[in-house]
Image (spheres, helix red, strand yellow):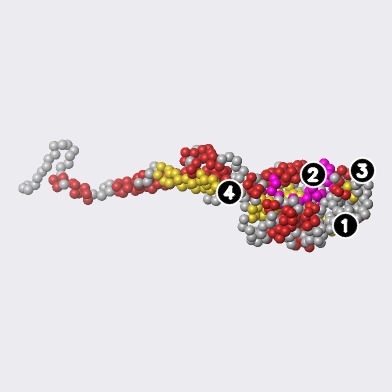
Amino acid sequence: MTGMKIMVSTHPGVRCTDQSETLFPQRFVRREDGSMTVFAITVILLSLIVGGIGVDLMRNEMERVRLQNTADRAVLAATDLDQSRDKTAVVLDYFDKAGLGHLISAQDVTVSPGLSSRTVSVDLMNATPTNFMPLIGISSLPVPTRSAAIDDAPNIEISLVLDISGSMRFDEKIDKLRPAAQEFVGTVLRGEAAQRTSVNFIPYAGQTNPGREMFHYLRGTRLNVTALDQSAGGIPSGQSNGTLPAGFVGGTGSNPAASYVYPNVSSCLDIAPRDFGGMGLPPAGLFGQTAHFMNWEISRNADDLHGGEEMEWGWCPQDHNAIKYMSNDRDALQSTIQNMRMHDGTGTHYAMKWALALLDPNSVDAMNAMIDANVAPEAFRDRPAPFNDEDTTKYIVLMTDGAITEQVRPINAFLPRNLVSPLRAADKTTITNAATNVQSFYDQCALAKAQSPRPVIVFTIAFSASSAAQTQMRNCASSPAHFFNADNNNISNTFRNIARQINQLRLTQ
């Protein structure tokens, strides 16, 4: 067998083969066994890199959110005009408590005080190290943090309207109202804000007393000066409104030198229903005075004529319970609230009429007259501001514990028995029914909310009130969110909430 080569293996189990099979490198290149392994490894590596990038990005976002939330809380706390601590220290303390104090310094905090505002801002640039992204050349990711807050007190005009009707003496409501309203005044007139905030304080019962000065400015017609002995309830003429006519002979009393007269101790104007269709002050020279009487069986104590422990005689609050105009004297207002006394009736429509009229820019001459009469501060001359003044916001804060009642008047304003007893049916007449008065109230609420371009913001509070009163307050409020249904347990929180909204603390970045 010429030409054939036989290879013999000297090792058992080894197959003999043609010599050509020993040339395997070329054949190995052509073989496909295991060719997917390289691709699979490449895919796995790319998946790990992409997943790692995702992990690094999520860590970075978590850190950013953590820093941003801390910065937002810090600047809000520091910006608050109530904040008495150093503002930068407040911000740094917030970061310390969050375990982030090492990421911020005082140079990262900016405090910008204004006349009646404060802005605090934080501007940080930190970075989070990456675990996977170094594979593509990125060793860290930036964490920018910017936050700013402003607590500003623009020019603010407030009419604070409080119900001092006789029902407020039940269930300690008047005792709960006083500190709540005092705190409200203290909040809106705190610090620098008092320079630009004016409060018309309007207590009301069956009527609303604008005070002797406004009564005179509007040329109200006073009840005639009538002689009345002290034993029948007369008071010295010097304590009563009105001027003694020539040759007047008064009643007698303990002071032989004094002329005793019927007690004209209040100054309410009997505004007609037709005047609730407009928002301004009552037209001058058209209205007479509300008489001195009680309608309901609330008190028969003769001491209430000049001031009992809880209530004073009168459907119209007496002059020391009259409106206080454009005040920014926190202590004086809080003292007035503490000393306010309850009277008869619930004439919320009258109170709303005055509350809105005192925010109406057409009332500026009357308010300047109150300044000239020394019953309003010079600092607020030329208020109320126009409704289109972008730097002024107007608010009405109205609280009541009862539904609006009918309006009655004595047939004989000078009947002495009216000083010690509620009106008898035969001695009184109804001048407007409850439905008419509710509509007058709604007319004023609608006018307040319709002012353009900047409506009056109306907050209302039904304080342990009937369903009818709740409905009236709800319908008057600027929105459902501006209506509060309060009781003894939350009346303070209600006033506090409203005051905080008026103060307008907010984030700007």
Label 4 sits on residue: 114
Instruction: Give, as a three-letter code, the residue at label 1.
Output: Thr
The magenta stretch is 307-330
Nearer to me, 76 or 172:
76
| Alpha-carbon span between mark 1 and mark 3 | 35 Å
Q: In the image, is 321 to the left or to the right of 130?
A: right
Instruction: In this rendered view, identify the residue nearer to me: 53 or 266.
Output: 266
Amino acid at the residue labelled 2: Arg
Q: Earlier in the sequence, mark 2 or mark 4?
A: 4
* Of 139 and 12, the residue lying toward us: 139
Mark 4: which amino acid?
Gly
Judging by the rendered image, the residue that carries numbered circle 2 is 169
Label 1 Cα neighbours within 10 Å, binned few <14 / some 14-19 / many ≥20: some
The residue located at (88%, 44%) in the rendering is 302
Chief secondary structure of the magenta portion: loop
Front of the two marks 2 and 4: 4
